[in-house]
Amino acid sequence: MFLRIDQLPVQLPRSTKIDPESAAAVQELLGGRFGEMSTFNNYFTQSMNLRGKKKLGAYYELVANIAAEELGHIELVSASINSLLNGPDSDTEDGTESDVTSTTIADLTKDVNQYNPHHFIASGRTALPVNANGAPWTGDYVFSSGNLILDLLHNFFLENAARTNKLRVYQMTKDPAAREMLGYLFVRGGVHALAYGKALETLTGVKMKDMLPIPSIGSEVFPESKKYMDIASHTKLYRNSPNDYRQMDALWNGDHPDGGTCVVVDGPPEHGAPHADLIGIGSAFTPDYHPAEIFEMAQQLYKKAKS
Ligand code: MN
Ligand code: MN
């Protein structure tokens, strides 16, 4: 079962402008083969299916807890896409009806080379579970063989492929919200790759961690990552449960290759931050053509429930 915390793992700065081209590229990191929906669903499926959960102890717990963290990464990547599709708040639109007879969407996309039309037609300028080509995420991306070593090896590969794609998307956008998300996830993906490498080493003797990082560039090169390494995020594996999963430190311990000591921390991350609250956009009919009316109805309901 899951509890839910109404925060993002880190604070994202607002995007400086509406940037549909970057939003389409970042979609790869959400619904692409190596996106956060894939890391989550791979580890989640494996954690449900694994036999001998009690006997396997730390190995099961590692996969189960990284799965839980990936759910938060889905939220973080989605928040960055939403930021890119909305830019800074415009006070003139919030809660007001707008002129639907003007060509609002055409204006937003007129100087853009490539974008996903579904961001405007289907979702009202928010994220979708699709890749950069607009193709939907699919369960075909999930590998759950039931063989522990094979699954861990797949997960090691998956984390490094995810990192490769993220490094490339970093070079496709200068947007501060997207780069903040990327900087944090370079560090967290590094933790996951190392954790799976350590687990494989205990089972096979193969020094998987000597291969890291893949690609062979340290996360500290990126200022958006360096600041999270300065607060030791790269050493922390989060235990996403108040009472369960007590054996993970049997795998996550010892010196970290980038400095510091690997430590299991009772989650959530200490730098959790509120969601950016998107304004209503009348011309996109979200939450409706008269946003102020819908907001007022919700507030009335709350007042009624309290009285
Ligand atoms: Mn992730
Ligand atoms: Mn990961």
Image (tube, helix red, strand yellow):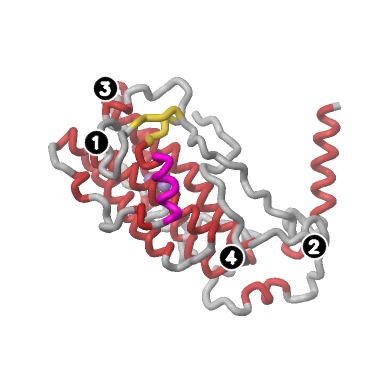
Q: Name the residue carrying label 2.
A: 92
> In screen coordinates, is 286 left or right of 25?
right
Residue 199 badge: 1
From mark 2 to mark 4, how far is it between C-alphas? 25 Å
Q: Amino acid at mark 3?
A: Lys
Q: Nearer the viewer, mark 1 or mark 2?
A: 2
Q: Amino acid at mark 4?
A: His
Q: Nearer the viewer, residue 235 or 127?
A: 235
Q: Residue at x 57, y 57 (%)?
A: 127
Q: Name the residue carrying label 4.
A: 118
For label 2, the SS is: loop
Q: Nearer the viewer, mark 2 or mark 3?
A: 2
Say if 71 sits above or below 22 in the image: above
From mark 1 to mark 3, how far is it between C-alphas? 15 Å
Q: Amino acid at mark 2?
A: Thr
Q: Mark 4 or mark 3: name the one nearer the start of the chain.
A: 3
For label 4, the SS is: helix
Q: Nearer the viewer, mark 2 or mark 4?
A: 2
From mark 2 to mark 3, how far is it between C-alphas? 60 Å
Give residue 291's quadrant in the image: bottom right
Q: Nearer the viewer, residue 120 or 72?
A: 72
- Could one spot residue 139 in this view of the protein? no
From mark 1 to mark 4, how far is it between C-alphas? 41 Å
Give residue 266's quadrant in the image: top left
From mark 1 to mark 2, how far is it between C-alphas? 54 Å
